Image (spheres, rainbow, N blue to C red):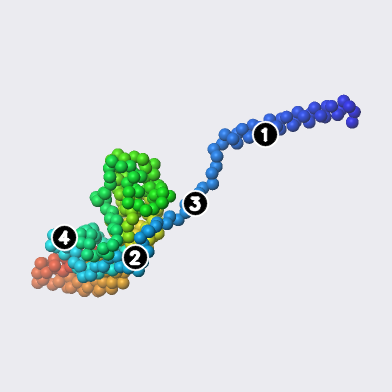
Amino acid sequence: MSSAEFKTSKTRHDSMEKKMQKKATALKTRIDKLDKFTPPKHDKEIKFIDPAGQQFIKKTVLHVRKMDVKFKKKTLISQVNLSLKYGEHVNIQGVNGSGKTTFIKQILASKDYFNQSISIGYFDQLNQNLILTQSVWQNSIADSTQDNQVVFHVLSALGLLAFKDRLAMNLSGGQKVRLQLAKVLLGSHQVIILDEPTNYLDLKAKQALITFLNNYPGSVILISHDVAFTNQIRGKTYFIKNKRWLDSLSVQTFSNRNQGNLMDLKYRLDAMIQNPDTDIDDIRKIKQQIDDLTSEK
C-alpha cells in the first residue's frame, strides 16, 4: 500500500470510529435517562410474637359450659359448650340475629369464662378504642410488643402506612375501623376476638389478614359472613342453627334429621290441602314449620 493509500485508509477508519463512539455516547445517555429497575422484593412471612405465650402453651384460655345466650330474656342459643386452648382458632357462623355477637358480649361481660392471666383483644366496628389526639403510628404501637417491621407490614396491608403520621381524629370512618383492627392485631394479647373484620377491607387487605390470622400465635375467635374468607382461616367452625350450638359433624346430623322432618311435613301438608274438612289454621301451622326448617338449611 502506498503512503497516500495508507493515509486515506486511516482517515476513513478514524471517521468510522468517531461515529461509533458518538452513537455509543448517545445510547449511554438514553439508558441513563431511563427509570431505574429494581427487582421486586418478596415479602417475608410475617411472624407475630407473644413474649408471654410460652406460659400458656397447652393451657385452656376459655371455657364455656352449658351457657344459654340471651337477649332481653329471650334465648338465642341454648347450651353452648366451648373450650379453647392457647393457640386454637375457632370460626362462628350463623344468620343475622342468631346470637353470634350477643354470645361474644356475654362472655366478655364475665371474666369467669376466661383464664384470669390472659389479655384479650376485641374488635368490632362500633367498639373503637382509639386515642384521637395521637397518630396512626402511636395508636398502633401503644399496646404492642411487635417489632417495627411487623407494624409497618400490618399498616401497609390495611392501607394505613401512608397516613402513619396523621392524627386518628383526622381519619375517615373506614380508616378508623381499619386502625382499630390493626391495633387489636398488634396488641399484646393471648386471645383476639374479631367480629366482622372484613367489611372495610379490599381484596388485598383480606388476603393479608388471612395470612396474619393463620400465623397468629395466640387464640382467635372469628365471626364473619364472608364464607370465602373464613374458608381460608385455620381452625374449627361452629354453627348456630335453630338456637343450637353445633360443630361440623352435628350440623350434618342436624341437617339430615331436618330433611326427614321436612319431607314428612310436606306430605302432611299435601294431604291436608286435599281434605276439604281441614282447618285453615292447621294448614298455616304446618306451612310455618316447613318455612322454619327451610330457613335452617
Task: Name the front one of labels 1 and 2.
Answer: 2
Q: Position of residue 224 (x, y in %)?
A: 30, 57
Q: Residue at x 55, y 39 (%)?
A: 36
Q: Residue at x 13, y 62 (%)?
A: 73
**Mark 3 → mark 1, Cα distance in angstroms:** 36 Å
Q: What is the number of the mark on residue 42? A: 3
Q: What is the number of the mark on residue 71? A: 4
Q: What is the number of the mark on residue 56? A: 2
Instruction: Give the residue type that dot 3 points to.
Output: His
Q: Is residue 97 above or below residue 280?
A: above
Looking at the figure, which quarter contains the C terminus?
bottom left
**Mark 3 → mark 2, Cα distance in angstroms:** 33 Å
Task: Name the front one of labels 4 and 2.
Answer: 2
* Residue density around tag 4, few if under 14, some if 14–19, many if 20 or more, within 10 Å: few
Looking at the figure, which quarter contains the N terminus?
top right
Disc 4 or 2, which lies upstream in sequence? 2
Instruction: Give the residue type that dot 1 points to.
Output: Ala
* Residue density around tag 3, few if under 14, some if 14–19, many if 20 or more, within 10 Å: few
Instruction: Give the residue type that dot 4 points to.
Output: Phe
Look at the numbered disc 4 and give the secondary structure of its residue: strand
Determine which residue is flagged by label 1. Answer: 24
**Mark 4 → mark 3, Cα distance in angstroms:** 48 Å
Look at the numbered disc 2 and give the secondary structure of its residue: helix
Residue contact between numbered discs 3 and 1, judged by CB atoms under 8 Å: no
Instruction: Give the residue type that dot 2 points to.
Output: Phe
